[in-house]
Image (cartoon, helix red, strand yellow):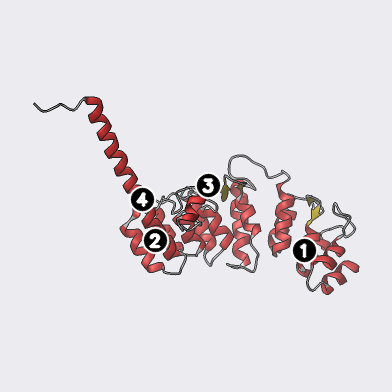
Amino acid sequence: MKKKVSAPTLFGIIIGLLAAMLIAVLLINIANAKEISELLNNGKKTEAEALIEKHPGCLNTRPAYAPRWLARFMDFPQSGYLLPDACSNGYYDTARRMVELGADPNKGSFLKPLGAVLQDKHAGCYDMAVWLYEHGAKAEVVTDPWSLPEYSAIWAIAYTRADEGCAEEESEKLFDYFYERIGNTIGTEDSRSTDDWPLIMLLCAGNGHSGIIERILDKALCDVNADSNGVTALMRAAASGDTEIVQLLLSRGADKTKVDKDGLTALQYAEKYCKNPEAVIRLLSE
């Protein structure tokens, strides 16, 4: 006489089989995502696109889905999800197709897709950033649960040097677009008059964004002599040797005599940190 399988035992077997199937699917997705990520990050766009069309189910799987220490041990890439990879490499048509196939426009382990577009700034970054935002991307551009808070789109625009990636005109258009919609926020509250603006000014001064500095001052978002942790925009521009921004800030009333927490002026920043300080020193000595 055959022994009947009890209902609890049968239920356990079914659950076990389902769990095994889910794990198998996850491992397949991780393997596919890893392969696509490697192709994207090694300039093999066409091969990556073919796999994306073949395996769209892996688009929201992080290649390093495991904890970081295990991801390193298993030699998984650390860049995160596939959509930010495509955006970081300037493969904007590929990125659009990925979203159409179901990629989450807010998935990212460090840089989110919008952050990748705004920071790396390849040609066409304005159109891509607007497209992502209009297709559900939030204005929080980078989230690292281990160390960093969420940063705004405005922060990401200011963070990258003006002479890297797309033309400065696109950065200015991006500033206008996101400021008009959400200000210097991640879209959850209006913080256009908070202490974040001195930091944005500082980043712009160090990265050559003269047009954005003019916009900030014209809109009275920040005083020209405001400081972030004691450092003013003039000090940062002097340290960078950017004569254009030094002249701009001086023309808008920047105080050459203001000192930081260590008692250093903008002139001393130029002398201490600038590789070729002569032109800046002349401006600050007049």
At x 15% / y 26%, what residue is drawn?
4
Q: Secondary structure at mark 4?
A: helix
Q: CA distance from mark 4 to mark 1?
A: 49 Å
What amino acid is at disc 3? Lys
Which mark sits nearer the N-terminus, 3 or 4? 4
Where does residue 96 sit, x and y in percent of width and height? 42, 58
Q: CA distance from mark 2 to mark 1?
A: 43 Å
The answer to whether residue 44 is seen in the rendering is: yes
Q: Secondary structure at mark 1?
A: helix
Which mark sits nearer the N-terminus, 2 or 3? 2
Residue under label 1: 237
Q: CA distance from mark 2 to mark 4?
A: 12 Å
The answer to whether residue 108 is seen in the rendering is: no
Which mark sits nearer the N-terminus, 2 or 4? 4
Q: CA distance from mark 3 to mark 1?
A: 31 Å
Looking at the picture, tell me which residue is in the foreground, 121 or 179: 121
Mark drawn on residue 279: none
Q: Are marks 2 and 3 in contact (CB under 8 Å)?
A: no
Looking at the picture, tell me which residue is in the foreground, 133 or 58: 58
What amino acid is at disc 1? Ala
Mark drawn on residue 35: 2
Mark drawn on residue 27: 4
